[in-house]
């Protein structure tokens, strides 16, 4: 057996560097997951590197790694020159040596046990739940930022920028609340019902790029809607002594407006930019609004200004000014007003040219696809996403509520009903859409002789879920129960198809409550698969071509299985795997789940014996036959069977015998099937009267 062509590299100093490895202990690589019900699992790598020259100690000043590589340094395993098996990040450098070892000596040994993981490992180490707005704004490089998502007992507002100044309560009573926040927020500052409460902070000096932006989320309610009310949730002092006021006004006989006004230190107007008509819902109506001021220094003395409200352009003007913002006042009360339920959140200062898009982040990115949700979360960490399948067919998500990155990824994977994993050829994520799992052609076709022992059939109830409830985050729920048929909830002593009740609750985040019954039915469908399957399949990758091409979500098949296991072709979807690379051998163990639940129907599919079809569900045999001998079968059933010549042949299931039907005559409830004496899967047996008659491969509704 030929020696494995193995190359292991560590990335540092801008390029990949080969490191020596031992194969006396196999290199172990795992990818995907082992349990189809689990959330995403990080890929992993363990190997033993040769450190007899002492160069693989990142803390050794004489090592080429010193100051250039360490924890989370990228590592890559490649076979045969181009077959990248995994790119991961080194989590552990475990330095080992024998007692008698000395660098340069002839006795003893020194090595490094390297443990590495995909980026999901690092993403999973964060435990601080973050809001969509925090994620969006911090990723946009603000020069100053105060999320206002502090705890109830806080007496200051923390900066969203490390080392930034805290915002202090200068007067009055200001509480920090979560009730009433938008989905994209984790809290806000609630200004109590008085005209003296105020938060203040000095804006750290920042580079004058020729542009700056000020943005704030605000909510308030006019106490007396018939009176004229003018309210400024945010005041911004400039280095010139002037002040910007972010304002809202409403009242009987006046046009409700959002506005920004520039005023002298004595209160005189310099400029007023506002909405001739306010977007609905309007100002001071109790709804959250985003106000953004965009300023460009067009020359030494003039600035252009634009007002944006709720993500839409409102008004613009040009005026004489050349100063930058220096201090915030929140709110900046204007005269004697009656505004209650005042909320302030996510105040940010930017010095970039492009307006920072925040509106849909505040809403939690509702109705974006599951693929887009994964891409957005990955982009916050600068990670690429490989998408397998059509993103246009991805499930539509509900709002992204504050949570950890891994929880959000897991929620998205469950809602999509696809497979989310680490990429293996690069540091990044990979999502395979749920619909891309449907109706696949096999990537790898195996024979029983290709399989390494053990090949243990799975015929148990560990994956059974016959009473399923799905919950929508912050929404309704739906329940689906298998009352009859395979794997139903009845007691096995009362119904041979019954297995007892197994209850499961699954938390999802689809966009609407209306879709929940479909999710519940789909999850129930996955939980009542009644067939022998194989959870793990191991092959010698050196002897079986095409093994390296198999990845998460691919279909593999096994033909020629012993008849006592199953007479049928085993069809499995790979959800993960483990590779064991030795000096002269490589084995791959695929973690699998049954493929049959993903055999969804296709409308107007060309007719073949193996076509998926919709058919009756409650027909039974009306007499006794023997498969392989009988040529006619009487069937009783109120539901209609096809009698059209163009629909034949078709295959039916009679107690595990795959019987080919070449014609059907009759009408409900009495039917006569013409059947072939050649049984497709070779199961020849007596079929008693009253046996259920089902299509061999009935069409299923996909999600």
Image (spheres, rainbow, N blue to C red):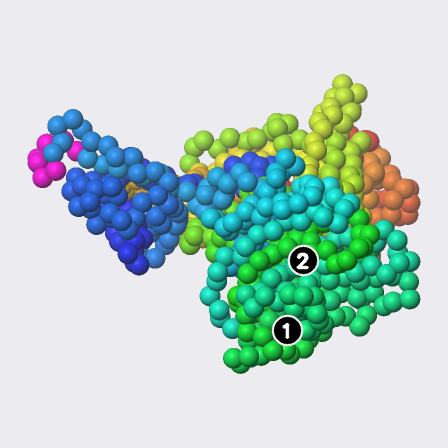
Mark 2: secondary structure: strand
Residue 314 image offset from top left, x and y in percent: 73, 71
What secondary structure is the stretch in magenta mostly built from?
Answer: loop
Q: Residues within 10 Å of mark 1 (few under 14, many from 20)?
A: many
The residue at the point 75 percent across, 58 percent down is 334
Q: Nearer the viewer, residue 602 or 607?
A: 602
Where, by quadrant of the figure, is residue 532 drawn? top right
Q: Nearer the viewer, residue 407 or 412?
A: 407
Left or right: where 341 falls relative to 50: right
Left or right: where 419 falls relative to 86: right
Q: Is residue 657 above or below residue 662?
A: above
Is residue 198 among what the camera can see?
A: yes
- Quickly name the residue at label 1: 305
* Residue at the bottom extreme of this rendering: 299
Q: Is residue 33 above or below residue 258?
A: above
- Residue 220 on the magenta segment: no
Magenta span: 103-109
Q: Which is more foreground, mark 2 or mark 1? A: 2
Q: Nearer the viewer, residue 598 or 141?
A: 141
- Report how far apart the C-alphas of labels 2 and 1 lie in the structure: 17 Å
């Amino acid at each position: 057996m030929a020696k494995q062509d193995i190359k292991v590299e560590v990335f540092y100093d801008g390029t990949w560097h080969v490191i020596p490895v031992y194969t006396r202990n196999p290199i172990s690589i795992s990818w995907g997951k082992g349990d189809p019900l689990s959330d995403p699992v990080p890929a992993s790598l363990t190997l033993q590197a040769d450190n007899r020259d002492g160069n693989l100690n990142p803390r050794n000043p004489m090592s080429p790694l010193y100051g250039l590589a360490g924890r989370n340094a990228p590592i890559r395993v490649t076979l045969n020159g181009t077959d990248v098996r995994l790119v991961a990040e080194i989590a552990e450098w475990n330095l080992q040596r024998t007692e008698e070892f000395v660098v340069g000596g002839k006795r003893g040994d020194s090595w490094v046990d390297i443990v590495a993981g995909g980026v999901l490992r690092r993403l999973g180490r964060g435990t601080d739940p973050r809001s969509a707005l925090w994620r969006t704004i911090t990723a946009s490089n603000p020069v100053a930022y105060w999320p206002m998502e502090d705890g109830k007992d806080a007496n200051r507002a923390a900066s969203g920028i490390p080392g930034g100044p805290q915002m202090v309560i200068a007067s009055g009573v200001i509480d920090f609340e979560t009730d009433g926040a938008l989905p994209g927020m984790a809290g806000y500052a609630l200004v109590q019902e008085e005209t003296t409460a105020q938060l203040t902070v000095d804006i750290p000096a920042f580079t004058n790029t020729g542009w700056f932006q000020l943005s704030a989320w605000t909510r308030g309610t006019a106490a007396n809607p018939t009176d004229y009310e003018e309210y400024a949730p945010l005041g911004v002092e400039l280095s010139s002594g002037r002040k910007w006021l972010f304002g809202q006004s409403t009242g009987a006989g006046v046009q409700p407006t959002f506005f920004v006004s520039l005023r002298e230190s004595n209160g005189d107007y310099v400029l007023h930019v506002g909405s001739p008509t306010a977007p609905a819902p309007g100002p001071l109506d109790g709804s959250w609004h985003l106000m953004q001021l965009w300023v460009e220094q067009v020359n030494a003395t003039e600035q252009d200004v634009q007002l944006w409200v709720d993500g839409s352009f409102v008004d613009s003007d040009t005026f004489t000014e050349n100063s930058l913002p220096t201090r915030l006042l929140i709110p900046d009360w204007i005269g004697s007003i009656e505004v209650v339920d005042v909320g302030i959140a996510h105040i940010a200062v930017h010095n970039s040219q492009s307006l920072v898009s925040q509106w849909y982040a505040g809403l939690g990115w509702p109705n974006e696809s599951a693929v887009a949700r994964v891409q957005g979360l990955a982009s916050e960490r600068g990670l690429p996403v490989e998408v397998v399948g059509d993103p246009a067919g991805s499930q539509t998500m509900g709002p992204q509520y504050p949570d950890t990155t891994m929880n959000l990824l897991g929620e998205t994977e469950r809602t999509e009903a696809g497979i989310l994993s680490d990429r293996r050829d690069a540091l990044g994520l990979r999502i395979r859409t749920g619909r891309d799992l449907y109706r696949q052609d096999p990537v790898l076709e195996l024979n029983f002789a290709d399989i390494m022992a053990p090949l243990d059939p799975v015929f148990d109830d560990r994956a059974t879920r016959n009473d399923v409830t799905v919950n929508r985050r912050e929404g309704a729920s739906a329940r689906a129960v298998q009352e009859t048929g395979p794997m139903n909830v009845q007691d096995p002593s009362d119904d041979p198809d019954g297995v007892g009740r197994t209850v499961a609750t699954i938390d999802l985040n689809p966009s609407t409550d209306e879709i929940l019954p479909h999710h519940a039915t789909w999850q129930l469908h996955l939980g009542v698969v009644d067939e022998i399957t194989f959870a793990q399949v191991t092959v010698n990758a050196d002897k079986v071509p095409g093994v390296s091409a198999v990845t998460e979500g691919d279909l593999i098949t096994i033909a020629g299985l012993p008849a006592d296991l199953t007479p049928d072709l085993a069809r499995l979807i790979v959800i993960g795997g483990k590779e064991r690379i030795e000096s002269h051998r490589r084995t791959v163990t695929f973690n699998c789940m049954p493929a049959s639940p993903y055999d969804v129907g296709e409308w107007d599919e060309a007719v073949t014996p193996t076509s998926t079809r919709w058919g009756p569900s409650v027909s039974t045999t009306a007499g006794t036959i023997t498969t392989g001998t009988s040529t006619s079968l009487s069937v009783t059933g109120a539901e209609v069977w096809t009698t059209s010549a163009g629909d034949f042949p078709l295959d039916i299931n009679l107690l595990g015998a795959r019987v080919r039907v070449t014609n059907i005559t009759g009408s409900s409830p009495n039917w006569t099937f013409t059947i072939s004496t050649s049984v497709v899967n070779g199961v020849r047996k007596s079929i008693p009267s009253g046996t259920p008659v089902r299509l061999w491969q009935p069409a299923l509704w996909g999600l």
